[in-house]
Image (cartoon, rainbow, N blue to C red):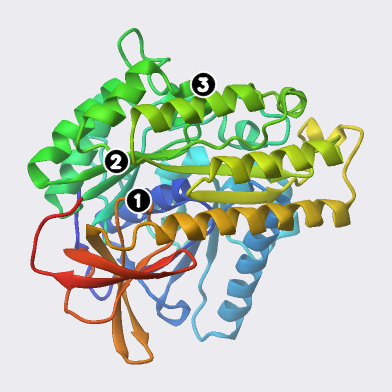
Amino acid sequence: MVSRSSSSTIDSPRCLFVTLGCAKNEVDTDRMRALLLADGFGEADEVDEADVILVNTCSFLVSATSESIEATLELAEAVAQGVRSRPIVMCGCVPSRYGDDLEDELPEVAAFVRHDEEDGIVGVVRAVLGLQPADERLGDGRVLRTIEGASAYVKISDGCDRFCTFCAIPYIRGRYYSRSERDIVDEVRALMEGGVREIVLIGQDTGIWGRDLGEGHTLASLLRSVAQAVRPYGGWVRMLYLQPEGMTDELIATIRDVDEVLPYIDIPIQHCSARLLRAMNRRGSVDELRALFGRLREEIPGMVLRTTAMAGFPGETDEEADELSSFVAEQEFDYTSVFAYSPEEGTRAARMDGQVDEDVKLERTQRLIDIAEQMGFSATARHVGERVRVIVDGIEEGEDGPELIGHAWFQAPDCDGAIHIEEGEAAVGDIVTCDLVDSFCYELIGIIVDDEEGR
């Protein structure tokens, strides 16, 4: 269910929430926030206003772990300089990955909460503040989500069974499990009632949703149910984190035929070399991927494609790096996220022979980025001249005054470019119709029009 206000009073202890990492962490933070607000806590916007600080961390890469720890230490320094004592609670992936070792390494942190312990956050925060225990859950087991704006992420699953050799997520998040369709649809309906107009379905591997729930439960069937829930509100449904083998006939037909489901497909390929994909414990080849994307373009005209590519996996040859660069250029993806391989502690790839030299890895990464940007900038420019519905995500102060910042159907929130509207009035969360008149890099310039047409 949704709440846009807190039941707390001005005298309630206030929590500052700091979220690092991906959209899945945003959802987890939102749940912890809802539990705490339901218990009577307030929310702070700045360190000086807070009584306790919750840092929801990311540990997908070594760099993300370092960023999480550095951010926590910076907060600890700010707390030390403050007037009041503000305990820090570290949540999420870093405690899940490193466990009890953190207590000695980070004495600045008052408590550590693994991702599967986050539903007990009320008890943890009450304990570090020296407050009496309280009931940590609402009566029906659901929580009131606090959403600002018109877009909301909804987790349909957690954990992962893939065990890609480069990835630590299964060790951090555990085995794959699907949320029930009823819980997901109930959450979507409540979000729509609260003013949300775009639902973004996420999970570690969204394409296999339902395989642990029994026959008849597929991502396509879930999409149809979610679409039915958003239809009365004129809402959109978007998916992220599909895998190539998850693109079934049923799913392709659903994306094509159900108006509420956006023709925006996010498929991380990581690589196109069959040999390297096998070494990653993934499937596919350049021919299979080429056939898949060709089929998608044929069956879903005008769709947007996002992917992820990795440079410098152990054993990658110059020829295989060239093959990946050529494939990304050939496919002209609308958006491509590029990562340099990172040897993650506890993963099989970190122990493989043939680790690529850092300078070579960075050169290959930059080459991929340059290609991805060239393709992406061109794809963005092709939208100039279109009339679209734009969700207003924020208001920024520009050189000539306030500027509305939003996104259209072909832009995932917080992932892709944005639409800049220099004239006109709207509030965050409003949906306006715009003519797209110019582009720069991944960004577009929009002009508000009265016509309500446009996707």
Residue 316 in picture, x, y percent from top left = 83, 37
Q: Is residue 341 left or right of residue 453?
A: right
Question: In the displayed structure, would residue 251 be above or below residue 193?
Answer: above
Distance (Cα) linking label 2 and label 1: 8 Å
The kind of secondary structure element at disc 3 is helix
Mark number displayed over residue 245: 3
Q: Which residue is drawn at the image coordinates 8% and 68% (left, top)?
A: 450
**Residue placed under numbered mark 1 in the picture:** 410
Callout 2 amino acid: Leu
Q: Which residue is drawn at the image coordinates 55% and 37% (left, top)?
A: 268
Callout 3 amino acid: Glu
**Residue placed under numbered mark 2 in the picture:** 262
Q: Which residue is drawn at the image coordinates 67% and 67% (left, top)?
A: 70
The kind of secondary structure element at disc 1 is loop
Residue 371 in picture, x, y percent from top left = 64, 54
**CB atoms at circles 2 and 1 under 8 Å apart?**
yes
Q: Which residue is drawn at the image coordinates 15% and 53% (left, top)?
A: 194
Distance (Cα) linking label 1 and label 3: 23 Å
Is the residue marked by circle 2 packed among few (<14), some (14-19), or many (20+) residues within 10 Å?
A: some
